[in-house]
Amino acid sequence: MSTVGFVGLGNMGGPMAANLAAAGHEVKVFDLVPALIAGVEGGTAQASALDAATDVDVFISMLPAGKHVAGLYLEEGVLARLPKGALAIDCSTIDPETAQRVAAAAADKGIAMLDAPVSGGTAGAQNGTLTFIVGGEADALERGRPLFEVMGANVFHAGANGAGQIAKICNNMLLAVQMAGTAEALSLGVDNGLDPKVLSEIMKQSSGGNWALNVYNPFPGVMDGVPASRGYQGGFLVDLMTKDLALAMTTAEQSRSSVPMGSLTKNLYRVHEQTHSAGRLDFSSIQWLYRPELVGGEGS
């Protein structure tokens, strides 16, 4: 078993750290919010990120944005504290350039580093069924694989450092497009007298079927256990989706790629965020943009 440092214990990181502890690893946990540290069953609380990086085999981070990742590893001194030969795994979704810059600094200190953003949502984090999209050296991935397999069900090697972030950005741009399109189609059906639950079942079994319809329906009352049926609380925040869409736009600009649907969806989410103060709601709340009469109503 490994000694693991884990920093960033929010909706995703907390369950991931708890799953590692439940599997028998010694997990040293830290977050800026003390209640989140206490919430990791089986974790050993640490007073700082540097303490969590002391005398560990593997160090894992799950943070909101690239500036936080660079700050943790480069400015707060985690790379300097980690033992030579340790493995660092950043599971945040950030810009590829920052992932590459931090990995290069880690290599200079004799530390292997992977960017390993995740897909699968909070349920995947809790159930240990996440998908890890990994950038970095293949041998470093194999070192981390036993931990990935505790926290997730799928591990993909996307390529060199930064490649995991690029693949995750592409995935989340598509996810946002699908969610906005699903909400739009459901609204069209309701406008014309259809029951959203019946329409959802029809589309799930037809060519319009997609992840949002199958497991994360955005219309309140259609599907049990999803954010739409609990006032869009929990899940993947609109603030995080707009961040990821901004990363997609920056990446597209750098590669001179055409992303008209991604650009439109980014603007739809920004309008939704500003109109409904929706930043802390789940991203499926984009349904409100098409049906404002639902705001504060069923499921809220």
Image (spheres, grey):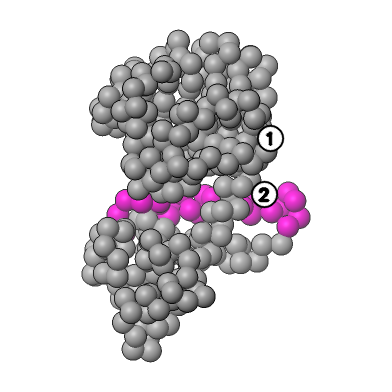
Q: Residue at x 52, y 75 (%)?
A: 207
Residue at which label 1 appears: 160
Q: Quadrant of residue 163?
A: top right
For marks 2 and 1, give the one nearer the viewer. Answer: 1
Name the residue rendered at 52%, 27% in the picture: 144
Check residue 248 for magenta coloring: yes
Q: In the structure shown, which secondary structural element does the residue marked by tag 2 occupy?
A: helix
Q: Is residue 124 left or right of residue 224?
A: right
Q: Secondary structure at mark 1?
A: loop
Residue at 34 percent of width and 70 percent of height = 219
Judging depth in this view, the residue of 277 and 126 nearest the camera is 126
Vertical placement of residue 140 versus 166, above or below: above
The residue indicated by pointer 2 is 251
Residue contact between numbered discs 2 and 1, judged by CB atoms under 8 Å: no
Could you tell me the amino acid type at mark 2?
A: Thr
Amino acid type assigned to the residue bearing label 1 in the image: Ala
Callout 2: few (<14), some (14-19), or many (20+) C-alpha neighbours within 10 Å? some
